[in-house]
Amino acid sequence: MKFSIYRYNPEQDTAPWMQDLVLDDSRIRPDMMLLDALLLLKAQDETLSFRRSCGEGVCGSDGMNINGRNGLACITPLASLGTPVTVRPLPGMPVIRDLIVDFEPFYRQYRAVSPYLINNDPVPEVERRQSPQQREQLDGLYECILCACCSTACPSFWWNPDKFLGPAALLQSARFMADSRDQATDERLAELEGPFRLFRCHTIMNCVEVCPKGLNPTRAIGRIKELMVKRSI
Amino acid sequence: MHIPNRRFDTLIIGAGGGGLRAALQLSSADAHVAVVSKVFPTRSHTVAAQGGVNAALANVRPDNWHWHMFDTVKGSDYLGDQDAIEYMCRAAPQAVYELEHFGVPFSRLDDGRIYQRQFGGQSMNFGGEQAARTCAAADRTGHAILHSLYQQNIRAKTHFFDEFFAIDLIRDAEGCLLGALVMEIASGELLLIQAKTTLLATGGAGQLFRTNTNALINTGDGMAMALRAGIPLQDMEFFQFHPTGIAGKGMLITEGARGEGGYLVNAEGARFMERYAAHAKDLASRDVVSRAIATEIREGRGCGEHRDHVLLKLDHLGTETVHKRLPAVCDMVGTFLGTDPAETPIPVAPTAHYTMGGIPTNRFAQVIIPEQQGPEEPVPGLYAAGECACVSVHGANRLGGNSLLDILVFGRAAANHIVDFLKENRYHRPLPDDAVEQGMARLARWEQKGEGESVDTLRTELALVMEENCGVFRTEEVLSAGLDKVTALAGRLADVRLRDHSAVFNTARIEALELENLMDVALATVASALQRQESRGAHSRIDYPERDDVHWLKHSLYDRTTRTVDYKPVRTKPITVNSFPPKERVY
């Protein structure tokens, strides 16, 4: 099976280049994921660099651009991919080496939305009550694994990574606004005012298209906009 | 060579649930904390925990901490330390309520309280009817907890060193812990972190085995660092094989699947757990269920072409229950098997899952070693919590739902003890001249160039040896062959060479350092297993099929320098209640 992989080692290379690599068909099982193939390629050439950890799509380490589409290598079946399989780092982010990008711009936007529960009531001795219906409001929001597939697929984020918060951070913001225990919706909404932070979302919906967890940041952003309208009336 | 130096009150190595829980407690107490993690915190393996965390909240069925304690002692096959177990079970409800206050999106009951499901080895009334003690956020409890703890640490402004790899601990001539030498992975640059207290929270070593449920980062780094700092490892022969990893692949299927009503069948379609655990059936302890599955397979009643697995049936529960209660399992099975568990049974087999043994600690999470004054003397300034530690609440077999509890309770206990320690130790101790020598030598070794075996070759062989020679069922013959093989592999390690000597994000170098760590932990595991001539919990010896409380009700301690195993007594006396004396263990 043929692969074309983005290589860049700043200590040696003046510019990134694409490396053609072949994995012997005898080593490929039909149920393999792309990560399995990358690990075999790394065993042949240990300089090939990428992040990976859980191998089952829950840690969010191995987001990359696979045949033009962002996804997690560990849950992308090899059999679903046309050859040569072209693998590049997540787009729009500074590349540190090979498939490894600098996530700091992404994490900075995550931290910018105060991604934690805010509740200023005295802490009760037991749990705060939340009905199953209230809890259901969090489904589709809390499962984010911060893989950055969505934000790095978003043209608005590419243009304004410092000003537009991006789908992942906004999904987090929506997650806390939707939590019946959180008391900071007003402050959260106020923080999102202005032309960039929230409103650079032009509902292109690449985020929905690529999310490996099947989440829908565009819908979450829509909910935030509704709350904003309500707040302004 | 000049190495920059940073000073903190506390250095925490590892940013899973244990490290983050401790960090939060310390940051909230205004201690100056550094968290060093080789991966971004939310990539830590806690994220993969599915089923939930045990606490006797009694939200679904009557419960109290004392029943939880009994189940944990029995589950441990009486090897657990009963003072630590009492402490953990009493602290459990508070630990869970705190999580709820931190924002963890627990599933809810109709009255708004936290949802609790049934898990293996749980009972009411000291061995009576099945309890429901496992607090769950669907089947993504670890993810929910890890992210909430990280988020609260953002709020508390904890200082993170993300993607820094710890090379070695620094200990002075008096034995005090002074910090660690660490490396920034992105640049390859070194940093000496000086700290008055150091907490190891580096997780387990599941990568010892070829087929495992663990993340690739679970390479026993903290355990090996402790060994190299002269600290023995305790009870390493007890490695948990989870009954339900996806056959041949390893991905975990939570015990919650059986807690929600799923059960196992063999090739004859028989619900075989009835024969092994008449009362608890599929919700017996993990060691019991894993042995039952392994026995079915050995006796030819396995399923599939190679008769190498059994089936986990959920299709009788109804699509709604399965999809609602186990959404992540459905996703995972869909991804890796292309089936829907609500319709098609899942092929499963016992799969390496959890390191019960580890760095010996007391219930304050202080690392304790045998010294002049007795077998349990604290190492000043050093703490350990979670899977890398052996406190020992899990003894010879951990109950499902107790690992998330362990990291929360002992992460917090460590932090509380550290706060007291800092009050009495207000200054950094002077660094010895040779502080970084050991760590630097470790790195220099990998700068050697030339021909040699690859890291990948040795790691692959090691994992295969461990799987074949240190698995569910063990004998003297298989284990001593295993020890010879691992010893030979450890010898070959000196001739392994890196091809990649670059500085920037050199993952090959990290994998080499991880292989060294795995090798030390593997030796500890096989050597301890060979010595223990009895069957207890997860350590199942065909040649010694019975538990032997007269000779073996004791903890093992493996020493790296001499490669020998010593022993110390089990703490059978709880803090306030009566001891649970060893009894025959029936489920």
Image (tube, rainbow, N blue to C red):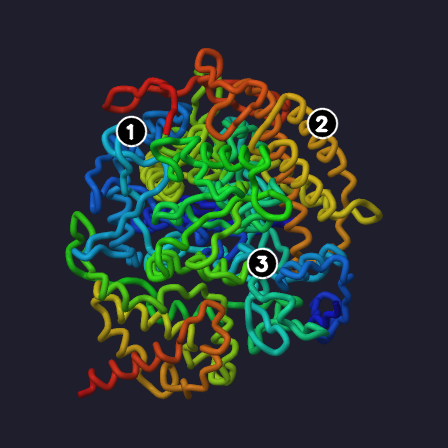
In front: label 2 or label 1: 1
At horizontal 36% and vertical 82% (from top left) the residue drawn is: A198
Q: Where is A72 relative to B220, above or below?
A: below
Which chain is disc 3 placed on? A
Question: Residue B453: which quarter of the image?
Answer: top right
Element at label 2: helix
Query: Badge 2 is on which residue?
Result: B484
Q: Is residue B308 left or right of residue B109?
A: right
Mark 3, residues whose alpha carbon is within 10 Å: few (<14), some, or many (≥20)?
many
Mark 1, residues whose alpha carbon is within 10 Å: few (<14), some, or many (≥20)?
some
Q: Which mark is residue B127?
A: 1
Which residue sits furthest right?
B451
- Please provide percent x and percent y for residue A7: 70, 69
Which chain is disc 2 placed on? B
Q: Earlier in the sequence, mark 2 or mark 1?
A: 1
User: The residue under label 1 is which amino acid type?
Assistant: Gly
In front: label 3 or label 1: 1
Q: Which mark is residue A73?
A: none
